[in-house]
Each structure stands twice: as C-alpha cells, then as structure tokens.
Image: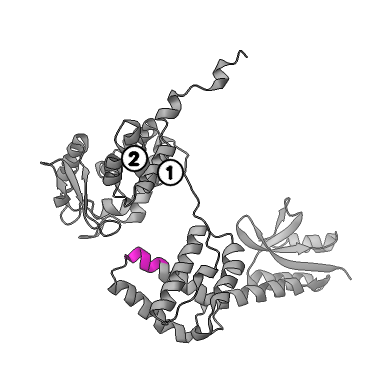
Amino acid sequence: MKTVTLYLAKHRQMQVVIIQFEMDDAIAAAIKSLKSSKWSQTLKSWYVPYNLEVLHEIKKLLSPLCAINAEQLKEQLNAEKDKATKNAYINTSAKPKIERYIKWMQSKRYSPSTINTYSEALKTFLKYHYQKPLEEITNQDIVDFNTEYILKQNLSSSYQNQVVNAIKLFFRQIENRVLDVDLIHRPKREKLLPNVLSKEEIKKILEAHSNIKHRAMLSLIYSSGLRRSELLKLKPADIDSKRGIIIIRQSKGKKDRIAPLSKKILIMLRTYFEEHRPKQWLFEGAMENEPYSEKSLESVLKQALVKAKITKPVTLHWLRHSYATHLLESGTDLRYIQELLGHNSSRTTEIYTHVSTKNIQSMKSPFDDLDI
C-alpha cells in the first residue's frame, strides 16, 4: 500500500501542509478534487492551506487509497504549541513586579517610549525563562537568552542592548540585586550613515499633496528639522510669527528648544489656519482635542512618495536628516546645526559630515587624468 506524507511548510508567506507521495493516478485525482489544493512548481509538491477542516477532508479522501504518515506534522504542531505556550506565559510571581517596574519608571519620569521598550524587553526575557523563579535567575540566564534567542533570530544589536539595559535596571531597582551584565558581550553599535534625499526629491515629496494640511506637516518637518513626535506635539501658540521661530517644548531629553520658522512656511501655515482653525493642537486628528496620529502621518508620507514616484524606503526621519545635511552643504556651522536639532553631543551631529557631498563633489578623481 502506498504512503502519503504530510508536513508543515511556509509557502508564499502562508503556513501550508505539503502532501508528498509516489506518483499514483488515484491519489493524485483525490488530491486534485480538494478545492483548496494547489501544485507548487517551486516545492515540486501538492499543498493545501493549514487548517483542521482541510486535514479532516484529506484523511477522509485518502484513507481508502493509501496510508497517511502525519508523524512529522504532529511533531511540528506540538513544537509550535510549546513555543506559543512559552511565549505567552510569564511566571506568576513576576507579574506584580513588572507592574512595580513600570510604575517606578513612570515616577522617575521616563518617557512613555522608553517605558514601553524596557517593559516589553523584560517581558520577552521573562517569557523565555518562564519556568524559573525570579530569585533564581543569574547572569548565565542572560547569556543563554542572548545566544539562544537574540543571536539565533538575528535581532539587532540595538535591541540586544535594550534588553540588557532593561534587565539590569529591573533587577537593581525591583529585586535589589545586581546582575553583572558586564560579563555579557555587548555589541558595538552599527555605524550607519543617515539616509539623505536630494533637494529635487524633497521638492517632489513636498509638492505631491494638494491637501494643505498634509503638505504643511511634511514641509514643517523638513523646513525646521523636526522629529515626528515634535511636530505632533506642537500647539498653535508654539508658532511665534513675530520672532520667526517655532518653540519645541519638552522634546527628547525633556528639553525645550527653538527652531527657525521659514517665511514660506509661515505663509503656508496661515493658509492652513484659515481652512482648518486648529484649537488645542497645531495639527489635530479626526477626534476633537486629539493630536494627529503618528500612523496617519506616516500614511501621508507614503501617499506622497507614491505620487512623487519615489521608490526609496523613505521615512519621516529622512526629512530631518536631509534638512541637517542640506544646511551643512550650504555652509551652516556644525555647532549651530547641533543646537537646531537638539543634539546633546556634537558627535551625533558630526555624522552628517559623512554624507555631505559638498567637498566630495569638488574633488577630482585620479581616474579623470587617465588617457583612456
């Protein structure tokens, strides 16, 4: 009697059940009769989407014709079940301490973003060691988590550092003991260059929208080098037209700063004001007294990219990077750019010197001197 083997696989970003068998007309006809069955040229096999109803149908159709080997499928399903259980569970004794950790960070005025990042990183670590009480967790457990979870999944070095920082802070403040995280190999931060658009590309993006609100938001980010969160927190009173500045309150590092207000942007904002009459926030969302959402702002940029026919993976932060780089290329002093961007260290601002094309374009390549 012939045998059909079933196992799970990923195909076209979908979980499917592969059906393998030696060529047999009756078995092939039975599989073809399944509405959901398809042939994959890549996998060289028949497959069906994974769900219990389809599996029952396969069993009903094929049992009279052949033996069904589903051992590998069962092992895969059990492994996924164990993984899901492990990822969904945190040791009961740890839950109230995680709440204390969050409240402690709130009392210390950590930013909502940092609180969310640290608490989620800690939860991921504790889910991995869900069978172990907190008081038994050691440095070796962090090393194991780093090796078996972070490195195996090829997660970023910045995420790795966030996890280590979150664990270190939790055990010091909540468990009153110090884990020697210095024993763990900390990855060096990747030295990535900021992504910068040309002035021509910026112009296309900012002109893409006819909607004055959408156009004003993107233009204001580029014209003053704002972060996304800084734009969305602006209030009408923060636009000081007489002094020609924008007041950015309690930004990154809980600092206030000022940014220059372009005369052309001021004209655009006045048109926007006349049409929309914002009250509490400069850019308000669909709900009254709610600021425009980050997700909606990202959508505004994506729509502009489509209209401008720009295929680069542009983010809102690229506009800020482009602002800084274009200032540097026009001769603005680096120290002044640091103040405009709100950087604590000049080293952060110096990265823009590596992407400025001003000096590079003036250099002559020795290739040009070759008579070829």
From the viewer's side, name the closer residue of 280 and 73: 280
Colour scheme in the image? Answer: one colour
Q: Residue furthest left?
A: 242
Residue 116, magenta (yes or no)? yes
Q: Main secondary structure of the magenta part?
A: helix
Residue in the picture at 60% in, 57% down: 13
Residue in the picture at 80% in, 60% down: 28
Callout 1 amino acid:
Pro
Pointers 1 and 2 in contact (C-beta within 8 Å): yes
Q: Which residue is mark 2?
A: 324
Callout 2 amino acid:
Ala
How far apart, in angstroms, are the residues tagged by discs 1 and 2? 10 Å
Relative image position of residue 184 (x, y in whole percent): 54, 68
Q: Quadrant of the C terminus?
A: top right
Residue in the picture at 55% in, 64% down: 185
Relative image position of residue 89 (x, y in whole percent): 52, 79
Does residue 219 show up? no
Label 1, residues with CA under 10 Å away: few <14, some 14-19, many ≥20: some
Q: Quadrant of the N terminus?
A: bottom right
* Total marks in image: 2
77 in relation to 190, above or below: below
Residue 95, magenta (yes or no)? no
From the viewer's side, name the closer residue of 119 and 293: 119
Apparent side of residue 239 relative to residue 182 in the rendered image (left or right): left
From the viewer's side, name the closer residue of 213 and 67: 213
State which region is magenta: 111-117
218 in relation to 286, above or below: above
Relative image position of residue 10 (x, y in whole percent): 65, 60
Q: Which residue is mark 1?
A: 194
**SS of the residue at dot 2?**
helix
Q: Residue furthest right?
A: 1
Does residue 205 show up? yes
